């Protein structure tokens, strides 16, 4: 009995062909899964269809190791932490071999350039998590099948050389080269291939794709460059791409001419603005009916390969698949379906803060913003020059007017920034949106506008309080606001405006949220509190101004209080000016507060109308209403021109009128001027009130 059992076991062992003491067979599958295996077994069954070498300690796979295994279909070499070298002709002349897996061999430093040869059935080659410094040489594979080459997690591979994949397959190929250490790809790297898919994702140090990288290739149809540092796409080869993936590719801020993406039907970008390049795009329905594009592909590939007449493309594979299920074949296909179009799919979608439009969404705004910013810059610069160069003593009102003119000048500079960038990026803003909104330019523009607007509101408030104080205590000279007091007050205002304008640059809100560089970011509690604080502060300033002018009105109407006629005129004029200023700002404040409370009432596109038509009106009007239209400004203007030999007669007339009016003013008040221009201003400080008439 025992003798019969022994004979039976010997017979089974001989039939299976397994003679090795550390490996085993499961049918025609030969498995070596022992750390005791330190070299390749020499008695592998010749009829084996699959080889598995897992957790072995083989250091070298010798030359011609698998020669003669003509039935071999799959080879797996994994978790071999001792493997260092794969010699030549290891995977050579194996007609049925269609899958090779080499993975988790961290010490594998070399695969001989002749290791892969004459593998006509190869469909899948995996090389993962090795110590290789170069891509394996595959140009002698010559497969007749569609091949997926999966080379990933090889962090020491730095370069893809020219013609690296030529000869891999006579059919289309899929190249997954993700998660390697690739830093450089040479021109013509994919020459001689028909690329169905090229995956370069997670090569974090890959910075560019050369202009000729796809020259000599057909495709890729699918291109994935996600999580790389690629900043530009080549212009050649894009016409074949149907799906483009570029997620978390933060350096890719500009796209080539969108007309080069003739076949693109789906894109995944990092920035929403890139989807704007393909707004309302329609693409022919060749994705669902590949036969539509099969013939041109065949012709193009035929021109390059010359004699390949019997290959099968990816499109034909799909047609065969659909033919068995739905019936259409090439001779019976309705080519009318090729004229159908599909909607272009793109993500991420542009949001409400960044719609698909230029910075100035309307042509009329594009014209008006230039007119307004030139007017604001010219008017306020003129006022500053005249006030600073005036020969008369710098008084509190004149000092405050200088501050207001400077604030309005900054708003003009902001509008000039916006208008200039709008002209430069007209109709192509999607290509410049990221550079502009994340760059120094937008931060500078945002800083200017927040600084200027807060300084302007602060100065208007101080002007109003100064007028109220001067009129209320007109006869109490000891309570007069001195220039030194005004300087201290305005220094605080400058510090406040500078600080709040600087906060978005350091992360409290952000200027990069919208193309017009306003702090509209309210996603965090601090950012929302910052925006609401500024808006409420502006409303509070308006309330203070209203209260002050109501008090001024009742003061000048009170017969028991003595105030000069000039003070009354100034109060009335400034009431009109400041109320006009804040009426212009009211719509902005209203809509901005609603938006900051996450209840937006208008879109960003409509808010640009407020930005151009309401926001800068004050900056344009203030220099004219506060200064240029006043007699004081005309006096200073003609006196300044007289220094250059112009308008001397008009200047002398204004000098005479000023001297006479000052004398009459002091006479009416029961005293005569005794202070010179260099006095401390106790008496002289009242004189400039007349100059504002």
Image: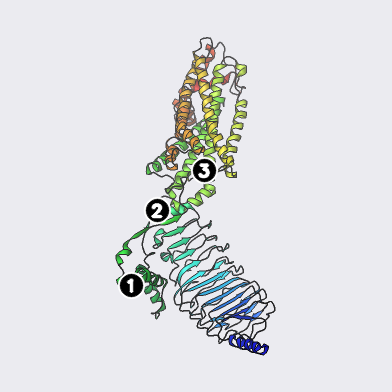
Return the x and y of residue 125 as percentages of the image width and height: 54, 74
Return the x and y of residue 691 as percentages of the image width and height: 50, 22
Which numbered dot is residue 279? Answer: 2
For mark 1, what is the residue? 330
Q: Earlier in the sequence, mark 1 or mark 2?
A: 2
Marks 3, 1: nearer the viewer: 1
Circles 3, 1 touching at the beta carbon (< 8 Å): no
Residue extending furthest front? 1
The reply to whether residue 550 is visible in this rendering is yes
State whether residue 634 is above or below residue 375. above
Marks 2, 3: nearer the viewer: 2
State whether residue 416 is above or below residue 213. above
How crowded pointer 1 is (Cα within 10 Å; few <14, some 14-19, many 20+) is rated as some
Return the x and y of residue 86 as percentages of the image width and height: 61, 79
Residue at mark 3 to residue at mark 1: CA–CA distance: 60 Å
Which numbered dot is residue 445? Answer: 3
Q: Earlier in the sequence, mark 3 or mark 1?
A: 1
């Amino acid at each position: 009995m025992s003798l019969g059992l022994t004979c039976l076991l010997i017979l089974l062992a001989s039939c299976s062909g397994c003679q090795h003491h550390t490996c085993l067979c499961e049918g025609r599958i030969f498995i070596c899964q022992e750390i005791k295996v330190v070299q390749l077994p020499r008695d592998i069954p010749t009829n084996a269809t699959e080889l598995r070498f897992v957790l072995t300690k083989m250091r070298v796979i010798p030359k011609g190791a698998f020669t003669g295994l003509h039935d071999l279909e799959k080879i797996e070499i994994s978790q071999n932490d001792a493997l260092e070298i794969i010699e030549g002709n290891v995977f050579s002349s194996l007609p049925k071999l269609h899958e090779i897996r080499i993975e988790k061999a961290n010490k594998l430093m070399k695969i001989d350039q002749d290791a892969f040869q004459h593998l006509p059935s190869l469909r899948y080659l995996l090389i993962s998590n090795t110590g290789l410094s170069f891509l394996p040489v595959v140009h002698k594979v010559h497969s007749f099948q569609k091949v997926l080459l999966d080379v990933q997690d090889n962090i020491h591979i730095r370069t893809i050389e020219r013609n690296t994949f030529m000869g891999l397959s006579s059919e289309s190929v899929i190249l997954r080269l993700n998660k390697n250490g690739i830093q450089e790809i040479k021109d013509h790297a994919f020459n001689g291939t028909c690329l169905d898919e090229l995956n370069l994702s997670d090569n974090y140090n890959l910075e560019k794709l050369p202009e000729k990288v796809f020259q000599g290739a057909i495709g890729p149809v699918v291109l994935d460059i996600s999580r790389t540092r690629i900043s530009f796409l080549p212009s050649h080869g894009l016409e074949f791409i149907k799906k483009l993936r570029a997620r978390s590719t933060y350096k890719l801020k500009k796209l080539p001419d969108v007309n080069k993406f003739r076949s693109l039907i789906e894109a995944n970008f990092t920035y929403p603005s890139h989807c704007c390049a393909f707004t309302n795009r329609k693409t022919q329905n060749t994705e669902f009916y590949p036969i539509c594009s099969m013939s041109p592909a065949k012709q193009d590939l035929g021109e390059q390969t010359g004699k390949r007449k019997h290959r099968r493309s990816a499109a034909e594979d799909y047609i065969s698949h659909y033919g068995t299920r739905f019936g259409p074949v090439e001779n019976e296909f309705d080519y009318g379906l090729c004229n159908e179009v599909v909607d272009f799919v793109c993500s991420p979608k542009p949001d409400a803060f960044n719609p698909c439009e230029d910075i100035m969404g309307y042509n009329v705004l594009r014209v008006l913003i230039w007119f307004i910013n030139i007017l604001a810059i010219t008017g306020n610069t003129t006022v500053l020059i005249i006030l600073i160069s005036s020969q008369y003593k710098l008084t509190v009102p004149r000092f405050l007017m200088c501050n207001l003119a400077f604030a309005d000048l900054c708003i003009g500079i902001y509008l000039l920034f916006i208008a200039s960038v709008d002209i430069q990026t007209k109709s192509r803003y999607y290509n410049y949106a990221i550079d502009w909104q994340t760059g120094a330019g937008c931060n500078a523009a945002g800083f200017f506008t927040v600084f200027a607007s807060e300084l302007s509101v602060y100065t208007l408030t101080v002007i109003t309080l100064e007028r109220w104080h001067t009129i209320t205590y007109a006869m109490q000279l000891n309570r007069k606001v001195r220039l030194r007091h005004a300087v201290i007050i305005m220094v605080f205002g400058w510090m406040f405006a500078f600080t709040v304008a600087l906060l978005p640059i350091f992360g409290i809100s952000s200027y990069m949220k919208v193309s017009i560089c306003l702090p509209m970011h309210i996603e965090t509690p601090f950012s929302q509190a910052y925006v609401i604080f500024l808006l409420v502060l502006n409303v509070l300033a308006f309330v203070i101004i209203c209260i002050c002018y109501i008090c001024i009105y009742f003061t000048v109407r009170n017969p028991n209080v003595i105030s000069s006629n000039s003070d009354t005129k100034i109060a009335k004029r400034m009431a009109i000016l400041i109320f006009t200023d804040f009426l212009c700002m009211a719509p902005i404040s209203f809509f901005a507060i609603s938006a900051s409370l996450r209840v937006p009432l208008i879109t960003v596109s409509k808010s640009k109308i407020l930005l151009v038509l309401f926001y800068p009106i004050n900056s344009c009007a203030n220099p004219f209403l506060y200064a240029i239209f006043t007699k004081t400004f005309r006096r200073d203007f003609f006196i300044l021109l007289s220094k250059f030999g112009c308008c001397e007669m008009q200047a002398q007339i204004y000098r005479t009128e000023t001297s006479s009016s000052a004398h009459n003013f002091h006479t009416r008040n029961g005293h005569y001027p005794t202070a010179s221009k260099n006095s401390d201003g106790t008496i002289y400080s009242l004189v400039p009130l007349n100059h504002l008439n």
